[in-house]
Image (cartoon, rainbow, N blue to C red):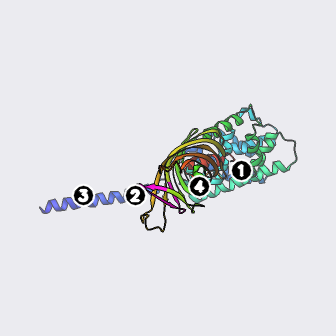
């Protein structure tokens, strides 16, 4: 028994020593750094200082080596674009990757991401600072070439402005289709259209007025407040909505309940239902929908009359509505909208159709979407 205990203790001690040795070796043995990351690190570290010293030949040699080892790494392409413009050798037609390269530059600035960001695992803070310094160098170089006063093609001027921090001219011209026939314009249009008809969810508050017509006009106009929760895909929008109306009627109205007639001007309205919209036009920032919906609608009369129950008298109706809505996304994730609809109503109180007719509703809507990926992509594309 004693031998078994000694053997067991020896095995546990051996495993513990091996585990410690293994961890020690893991710390001391350097990780294998992929060649592209190593080349990128050296290029981004040395090119800015070489440029300051005016060593153009060394920059060209280092850039060619960078492109050879890493292929289409975006960080090298930023510099290639600027040097080609400076040397009057830039050709937009042969650069199918141009839009993606531009987006990665903005992405690195906005979100701290780059195509070689995984290299931070090896260089940590030094690498993060190196990326920031290199992007600042690209901005300075673009501003310098732009300020040189040389004759530039429109696309060259837009690119220099973009890299120097002014993205508006480039994206404004792309939205106008100024570069039709180029891969840059085609890819921009394709990426925007993908986002224009993407799917997502939304939540909105609304407020407006409920304006009755025909025999319902005796109820008077009432404020209408509510909320919506829904989703959209392609051109279709579906939502659930909940609303409340309030403020006394301008005069008494009559309700028939249990073979008795009651009258009062006190009023409270409530409805809950579902709606559907179809976008006749859907842009990136705005859309115009035709809409329809069906809801449960009720009116409750409250009065001090002792004959009226404490809970009030409630009359009900189906609410079939049809209308239009214009929506504007003022910062992509949030929108305002103006909606107008006509509601077909028939409250069953059986007094000469006193409460039969319809109502016009006008709403101002304030909403929020939950499509983060769409917001991010459109922001990178200048929207």
Residue 11 — which label? 3
C-alpha span from label 3 to label 2? 18 Å
- Mark closest to the chain's N terminus, 4 or 1: 1
Q: Which residue is mark 4?
A: 218
Asked which secondary structure carries label 2, the reply is helix
Q: Nearer the viewer, residue 267 or 121?
A: 267
Say which element carries label 1: helix
Give the residue displayed 78% in from the left and 46% down from the top: 169
Query: Residue 34 location, x and y as percent?
Result: 55, 45
Element assignment for label 4: helix
State the quadrant of the N terminus. Answer: bottom left
Quarter residue 364 falls in: bottom right
| Separation of residues labelled 1 and 2 (CA atoms) | 38 Å
* Front disc: 3 or 1: 1
Which of 136 and 67 lies nearest the eye of the viewer? 136
Measured Cα–Cα span from mark 4 to mark 3: 94 Å
Work out how far the residue at label 4 is from the one at label 1, CA to CA, in angstroms: 80 Å
**Residue 176 bears which disc, if any?**
none
Say if mark 4 contacts mark 2, CB within 8 Å: no
- Check disc 1: other Cα within 10 Å, few if <14, some if 14-19, many if 20+: many
Q: Residue tagged by mark 2? A: 23
Q: Which residue is mark 1?
A: 47
Place of residue 121 in the rendered image (x, y in percent of width and height, measured from the top left): 53, 54
Alpha carbon of mark 4 to alpha carbon of mark 2: how far?
A: 84 Å
Whether the magenta-drawn stretch holds residue 364 is answered as: no
- Name which residue lies at 51% across and 57% down: 254
Assess whether mark 2 and mark 1 are in contact (beta carbons under 8 angstroms). no
Residue drawn at (76%, 39%), measured in percent from left and top?
176
Marks 3 and 1 sit apart, C-alpha to C-alpha, by 56 Å
Q: Earlier in the sequence, mark 1 or mark 2?
A: 2
């Amino acid at each position: 028994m004693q031998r078994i205990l000694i053997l067991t203790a020896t095995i546990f001690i051996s495993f513990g020593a091996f585990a410690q040795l293994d961890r020690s070796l893991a710390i001391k043995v350097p990780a294998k750094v992929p060649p592209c990351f190593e080349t990128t690190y050296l290029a981004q570290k040395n090119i800015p200082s070489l440029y300051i010293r005016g060593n153009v030949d060394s920059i060209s040699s280092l850039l060619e080596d960078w492109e050879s080892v890493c292929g289409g790494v975006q960080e090298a392409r930023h510099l290639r674009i600027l040097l080609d413009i400076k040397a009057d050798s830039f050709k937009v037609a042969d650069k199918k990757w141009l839009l993606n390269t531009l987006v990665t530059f903005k992405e690195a600035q906005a979100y701290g991401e780059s195509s070689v960001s995984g290299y931070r695992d090896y260089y940590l803070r030094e690498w993060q600072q190196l990326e920031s310094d290199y992007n600042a160098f690209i901005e300075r170089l673009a501003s310098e070439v732009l300020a040189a006063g040389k004759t530039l093609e429109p696309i060259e001027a837009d690119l220099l402005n973009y890299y120097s921090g002014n993205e508006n001219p480039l994206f404004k011209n792309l939205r106008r289709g100024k570069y039709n026939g180029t891969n840059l314009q085609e890819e921009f249009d394709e990426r925007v259209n993908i986002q224009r008809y993407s799917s997502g969810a939304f939540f909105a508050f609304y407020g407006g007025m409920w304006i009755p017509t025909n025999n319902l006009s005796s109820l008077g106009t009432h404020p209408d407040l509510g909320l919506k929760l829904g989703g959209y895909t392609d051109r279709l929008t579906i939502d659930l909505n909940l609303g409340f109306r309030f403020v006394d009627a301008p005069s008494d109205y009559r309700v028939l309940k249990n073979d008795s007639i009651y009258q009062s001007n006190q009023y409270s309205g409530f409805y809950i239902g579902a709606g559907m919209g179809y976008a006749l036009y859907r842009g990136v920032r705005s859309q115009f929908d035709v809409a329809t919906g069906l809801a449960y609608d009720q009116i409750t009369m409250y009065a001090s009359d002792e004959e009226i129950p404490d809970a009030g008298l409630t009359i009900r109706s189906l609410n079939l509505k049809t209308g239009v809505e214009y929506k504007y996304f003022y910062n992509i994730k949030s929108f305002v909208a103006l909606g107008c609809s006509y509601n077909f109503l028939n409250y069953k109180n059986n007094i000469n159709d006193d409460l039969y007719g319809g109502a016009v509703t006008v709403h101002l809507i304030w909403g929020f979407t939950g499509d983060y990926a769409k917001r991010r992509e459109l922001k990178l594309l200048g929207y």
